Structures are given as C-alpha cells and as structure tokens.
Image (cartoon, grey):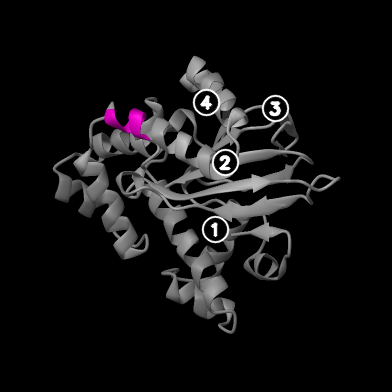
C-alpha cells in the first residue's frame, strides 16, 4: 500500500492532525492489522469504485467516519482501493459533523448518513480529479466550509489542552473548577464534543501516552514505562492494556501487526 502525507492548510491545522492518501495498487488485499485507540475520529473518503476496507468483519463500500476512542480496530484494505484519510485531533471532529460525538464513539458510520448528498458530490469530484494533490485540495475546501458553520467551544478546547499538557494525569475536579461547570455539566460537554466522559478520556489519554513511551524508549522495562506514564502499579497498567488492546503490554511491544 502506498501512503502519502500532505500539508494541512493553516486554517485547519488546529483541528486536523494529519491528511494522507492511501492507495492499494497491489493485486491482493493488505494484511490484517490491529490499530489501537488514539481518541481520534477519522474520515476516509473513497475516490475509487473499489470498497475501501474490511474493518472488523464488515466490508465498507464507500466513504466512512471511524472513531477509535477507546477500542482497537482490525483493518484490511482492499486491493484497488484508494482514499483520502483525515485524522482529527481529539475533540475537534464535532466541528465538522454537527452531531454528538458519543453517537460515533467506537463505531463506523457511512459519510453519506452524516453529510447526505454532499458525500456523493465529494466522492464524484475526487474520482474525476486527475491527481491526489487536487483531491486533497478539494476535500480541504469542503472541510473549511463545514468549519465556518460551527462555533468554537472554548471550555472544551481549554480542557483538552490541559489534558494534553498533563499527559492525562490532571483530575476531573480541576477541569470542573477551572471551567466553572459542575462535573455533570462537564461530562455532558465532553460526551457532546469528544465522545467520552472526562474520566474515560483521561484514562485513554494516559494509555496513549504509555504507547508513546513504548515506541520511543524500547530499552525501558515495562515497569519503567508504567511508572513514567503515571500508573501507580503494574497491575493497573496491565489491565488498561487488556481493556484498550486485548493484549498484554509485552505482546503489544513485540507484535508486528499492531499499529500505534
């Protein structure tokens, strides 16, 4: 499979983590891979007549929105498929889809069900474009149109920034006090914008940070990685890995088919 990354236009950089094209020109489907949770929502826009991928046990024909907030996903891209992948930063996708993010949490939804006729219009324009640079430019223009229709939520933006800075180790009570919302109000806002409760988002953020250590420092022991990631004991660390990956930390570190 050919993977090519593209420059994100400045107006979208606060919201979009990456843009890439994925072209499977081989004569066979790709190998199955397990993609771990990253608390992000992703958009895959198909520009071919070939189904995009088998995700889990389901074949997806057209453009889709996926949400790996707290569950792993098994993916196999189909031979002949081609699509643009847009990965949104955690908590930023709601600005483009105008629906509560908890509806999308850990699920796969057809883009046509969310953007209605616009999804078909985009797919047709991308299919008729002569090269991938043009396709990426077209799709970013549509994202700008969607962004212009939405208001900013400064409270959620603040909370997400604090979670990032603390690597998931900030108390929910601090976020509640800092924003002036009760914990119940804050939970409703998180479910609306992020798709998870504050507590669940903090937990998965800590797990994601541990994956960063696992990849960046392969010589560290798993006990050291657990400590550096903010886990109080090894058993808690192991339970989180079983919850979010279905594997032990050691198995994740060694496996070739697990992507993170």
Q: Is residue 93 left or right of residue 52?
A: left
**C-alpha distance separating marks 1 and 2:** 31 Å
- Pointer 4 and pointer 3: residues touching (CB < 8 Å)? no
Q: Which residue is mark 1?
A: 240
Residue lying furthest top: 117
In this view of the protein, which residue sits in the foreground, 65 or 207? Answer: 65
Sort mark 3 into few (<14), some (14-19) or many (20+) by Cα contacts within 10 Å.
some
Residue lying furthest bottom: 219
Q: Secondary structure at mark 4?
A: helix
Location of the C terminus (image quadrant): bottom right
**C-alpha distance separating marks 4 and 3:** 15 Å
Q: Which residue is mark 3?
A: 61
Q: Secondary structure at mark 3?
A: loop
Q: Earlier in the sequence, mark 1 or mark 3?
A: 3
The residue lying at 52 percent from left, 26 percent from top is 122
Task: Say the numbered circle drawn on residue 125.
Answer: none
**C-alpha distance separating marks 1 and 3:** 33 Å
- Pointer 1 and pointer 4: residues touching (CB < 8 Å)? no
Task: Say the numbered circle drawn on residue 122.
Answer: 4
Q: Earlier in the sequence, mark 1 or mark 4?
A: 4
Q: Estimate the x, y position of residue 65 in percent, counting from the top left.
A: 54, 33
The residue lying at 50 percent from left, 35 percent from top is 105
């Amino acid at each position: 499979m050919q993977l090519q990354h593209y420059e994100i236009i400045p107006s979208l950089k606060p919201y979009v983590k990456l843009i890439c094209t994925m072209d499977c020109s081989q004569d066979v489907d790709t190998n199955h891979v397990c993609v771990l949770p990253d608390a992000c929502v992703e958009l895959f826009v198909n520009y071919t007549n070939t189904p995009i991928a088998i995700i889990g046990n389901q074949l997806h024909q057209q453009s889709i929105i996926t949400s790996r907030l707290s569950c792993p996903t098994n993916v196999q891209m189909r031979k002949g498929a081609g699509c643009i992948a847009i990965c949104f930063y955690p908590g930023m996708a709601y600005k483009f889809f105008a629906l509560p993010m908890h509806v999308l949490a850990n699920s796969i939804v057809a883009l046509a069900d969310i953007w209605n006729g616009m999804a078909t219009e985009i797919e047709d324009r991308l299919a008729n474009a002569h090269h991938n640079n043009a396709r990426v430019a077209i799709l970013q223009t549509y994202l700008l149109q969607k962004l212009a229709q939405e208001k900013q939520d400064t409270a959620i933006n603040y909370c997400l920034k604090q979670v990032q800075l603390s690597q998931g180790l900030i108390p929910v009570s601090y976020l509640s006090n800092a924003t002036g919302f009760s914990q119940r109000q804050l939970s409703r806002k998180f479910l609306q914008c992020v798709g998870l409760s504050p507590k669940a988002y903090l937990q998965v953020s800590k797990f994601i940070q541990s994956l960063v250590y696992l990849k960046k420092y392969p010589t560290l022991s798993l006990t050291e990685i657990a400590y550096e990631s903010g886990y109080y004991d090894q058993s808690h660390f192991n339970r989180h890995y079983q919850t979010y990956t279905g594997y032990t930390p050691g198995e994740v570190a060694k496996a070739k088919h697990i992507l993170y």
